[in-house]
Every structure is written in structure tokens, then in C-alpha cells.
Amino acid sequence: MIFGPTRLEEARGAILAHTMRLGPGKVLKKGTVLDQAMLATIAAAGHREVIAARLEPGDVPEDEAADRLANALMGPLLSRSRAATGRVNLFAETAGLLTVNTEAVNRLNALDESLTIATLAAFTPVGTKEMVATIKIIPFSAPGPVLGVAELIARQTGGPPPIALYPFRPLKVGLVLTELPGIKESVMEGAVEATRHRVEALCGTLLPHERVRHETPAISDALVRLRRQGAQVLLIAGASAVVDRRDVGPSAIVRAGGAIEHFGMPVDPGNLICLGRIEEIPAMVLPGCAKSPKLNGIDWVLQRLFAGLAVTPRDVMAMGVGGLLKEIEVRPLPRAEAPSVPSPAQAPRKGRQVAALVLAAGRSRRMAPLNKLLVADDKGVPMVARVVDNVLASHARPVVVVTGYEHERVEAALSGKPVIFVHAPDYAEGLSASLKAGLGAVPPEAEGVVICLGDMPLVAGPMIDRMIATFDPEEGRAIVQPTFRGKQGNPMLWAREFLPEMMTITGDVGARHLAGKHADRVAEVEMADDAVLRDFDTTDALRKAPGFAGVR
């Protein structure tokens, strides 16, 4: 690739390296492939050269290179985004455990500086639609031979794939709770509740628990009963911590026909865990910290078991790096003082925190006397309720709904939904009044806000999630706009940095004009259908919308 100042007469087909502002409303974005008309516009603006990249024989354009490498890395239960600005993101199609072949990923990243792959950590529990990896081509192209080698490494068959997702299985779990005189009832109840949360977060079911004396025969008999009920994993929460593989709990596993495979683990909290098996059923004595819902060693073991992965003594002994959990973010305080928070298995990361704003304050003048937001679809669901349900199906949180005209009826239509209502008393002054009322309710921790229109019921949650996945102010994607066949639509996602400017808007206009002012910060996301272009202002238009044929 040839890069640097390029005379206009040599720049046809070159890739513009930096955004150029050529006058009011005339912006050429970084990455634009220059054609003759563009070059003429640049010349008319007084420029004689541009900073550009010109591909040489064998170079693969950035989007094509990202696309090819992503295809080579794809596996079962993974999905991917379209290539844009040399980037493709990979997502989980179901809840499960991500595995990473560290050696393979390191080999790929060491091939050439043009190719990069970033993943979540190995053995990270992920939720449906969560991003698990991103492929980024650093320059405007990648060398063809290097890309070919990368594809071979990514498709390797002699070992585990670079990235794989193992779905959580709906296992039935049996819990034996042992008791000694004087133990508090709250401790017993807490152990059951913490175990239930762990199991259900991994898509499993906790069978009715067995509560017995802290004695080997009683525990052994309880394990046998749980096996008869179909338990696929057996857990023992002892009233007293296990201190030896011959202690009461481990001895009960052996008495029930099982064997102890490993005692202890290099994870703290979680050291005193005892792993065993009764025939093919994993059987474990839990460490005392398992009575708490906070992250500890048992979470790492259960995540692998629910994903169908073996947990051998060698696997346990390899958990030491990263195994010091006491002062990580989810447990910043001593255990006795720390608040109850869900473990990562219960609360997968959603990436950047993005709030959602639903504008539902307008007077629907073009559909009078009807309030279009309250017009019900063929199933009796008001339009505004469909819009809000779609937003709630995305990762955007919190969801703020701005009301104005007939606000009591609009709020009643959304009764029971987990949203924040904000009333715009001056809604009659135009769209900007509603916008500013809603922006004032965006929490300070939100890095961005997606502004949704109350009359666009076809925009689905996954569309909003694609925009959130694209959003990255540090990389210049501070404004995200959906498109269909190149035509710009709604909703739009804005970084927090633009909120002060939005608060100065007046009249019956929104913030769309700011995108032109900050064109170099805009990232467009092409959608598969035209939902992002379709709002419904009239009864005739609404009848043509899916699910609204019966509107009168």
C-alpha cells in the first residue's frame, strides 16, 4: 500500500485518509474511495492534493480482509456483524461459556501489524447477543499472503478453534444441606437461595433440596434420593467447612458409590472445594463461601459443567492465574460488608452503557382526532407499547419515556413496564422541548443515548443492539445512524459529549442536523429491512404497517 500526499490527478480510486470539509454541507469522510466527481469537488475547493492510500497488487481492502478473517473464525452458535471501517464483531447466539485458544489467537496477532483480534477472556460466561470478539484491520488494507496464512490458522483442525462457544445445558441440580445444632436458619435459607441463583443463571433447575444431619450416612442417603429424582449434578453445602478429602461430606460421596477426584483449588474465595463423582454425575462439597451469591471458585466449576466441559484436577490446578477474586470489582469490600451483587454468570456484560429515550409527547395532528401513539394493533397493543417493548428487548438501559399530549393515557398504556416517565409540560413548543426534557433524565453514568421515536413500531431490539455494538466514541463512532440501502433512518445513538449541544436546540426540530455538523464522528449501520425508515403519521400509512391492517 502506498500512503501519503497524493496529487489529485493520481488520486482516482485512492482511499481518503482523513475527513475533509469542503464547505457548508460538503464533507468527504475518511475511508471514502475517491471518484472523478469527488476529485473535481476537492479541486473546486482549492485543494491540489489529498492524504490518501493507494492499494498495490496483492493488497486486500480493509472490509474484505476483515470479512474473510471473520468467516474463518466463525463457529457454531456465533454470529457476526457486517464489515465496516475494517471491523467485524462476533456475537454469542445463546447463553454459554466462551473458550479461547490463547496460542492460536496470539499467533494470529503476531502475523502482521495489520491484523488484530481481541476476545473476551477464556472461560467467560456470556449472554445471548453479547459481543465475544472483534476483528480490526488497522490500515486500509492487509497483505494478501498474510491474510491467507491467517485464514489457515483460524480454520486449524489439529486443535481447539481460536474461539468457541459452549451453550449452557438445562441441568437438574440436587442440593444436600447439612445442619448442626445452633446453626442460624437465615444461613440455611441463604445457602439455598444463593445456589438457586447460580443454577438458574446457568439455565438449570434446582430440585427440592434435602436437609439432613451433618453425618456421613444421612448425607449419603440424601444423595441417593436426589439421584433417583434425576439430579445431573450433586452439591453438598455443609454446616461445617470440609477440611480433608476424608471429611464428612467427601466420605458421603464415597459411601454413595462415588469417588473423590480433587480437594482444594487455587481460587480465593473457594479454596475448600471438594470435587468428586458418582458414576457419571459430578458430586461436590461446596466451600463455605458458596453460601454467598458473590463470585467464588464454585462459579468457575459450575460454568464449565453446565457448558458440558470436563473439570479435571489439572483444570482446577490451572485456575490460579486470575484466581484471586477477593478485591475484584464485583467484591470491592470485605465479604461481611459487601452488598449482595449477582455474579458475572448472572449478569453478563453489555458493553458500553447506553440509555434509551422514547419520544412520546406529540399531538398527532396528522392523525387527528386519534392519538397515533394509542392506536392499537391487530392484537390490541397500542403503538407506543410496541415501541417501548422493542426498546426493552435491547440492551439499552434505562429506558426513559417522554410524555406530553394526553400523558395520563400514554402512561396508562405503558403501566407496569420498567421505564422512567418524564413529562414535558411545554411539549406544544415542538420536538426540541420533548427532547430536552428527556435528555435531562439521562443518568450521568450513561455513555450515550439512543433517541427513539414513538411512532416507529417496527424497529426491533436487535437493531438497536447492532447500533450499540458499533458505538465507540474513542474510535470516532460517536454518532451511530441506521441506514437501509444507503438511506438514513432512525433511531440515532449519540455520545454524551453531544448532549449539551442538544440542550440548546429550539423549535419543532430534533438533533439530526447535528450529524451533518459532526459528519466525521458518524458511523452508519446498514440494516436488513426498511423498519428504520418507516414512521406512521397518517391512518392510511399505519394500515400498511405489519399488524395494523385493522386500523380504522
Image (cartoon, helix red, strand yellow):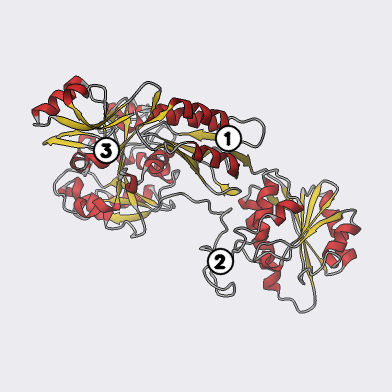
What's the residue type where badge 2 is placed?
Answer: Ser
Residue at the image point whose x is 69% and y is 50% from the top: 205
**In the figure, 72 relative to 254: above or below?**
above
Query: Which residue position is annotated with label 1?
Result: 77
Give SS at disc 1.
Answer: loop
Query: Residue at label 3?
Result: 370
Q: Label 2, on which residue?
A: 340
Establish if 529 lies above or below 218.
above
Q: Residue at x 72, y 65 (%)?
A: 287
Camera-side mark, 1 or 2:
1
Comparing 122 with 294, the one in front is 122
Q: Quadrant of residue 1?
A: top left
Amino acid type indicated by mark 3 = Leu
**Quarter the C terminus occupies:** top left
Mark pair 2, 3: CA separation: 48 Å
- Left or right of residue 265: residue 92: left
Q: Along the horizontal axis of the image, is 234 left or right of 491?
A: right
Q: Which of label 3 and label 1 is nearer to you?
A: 1
Q: Amino acid at mark 1?
A: Leu
| Precedes in sequence: disc 1 or disc 2 | 1
Where disc 3 sits, the SS reads loop
From the viewer's perspective, is the residue at label 2 or at label 3 nearer?
2
Measured Cα–Cα span from mark 3 to mark 1: 45 Å
| Residue 133 placement (x, y as % from top left) | 50, 41
Q: Position of residue 497 (x, y in %)?
A: 26, 53
Where on the picture, by quarter, is residue 185?
bottom right
Front-lying residue, 54 or 472 = 54
Residue drawn 35% across and 42% down? Answer: 384
Q: How crowded is the residue under tag 2: few (<14 C-alpha within 10 Å), some, or many (20+)?
A: few
Residue sitting nearer the eye, 201 or 72 = 72
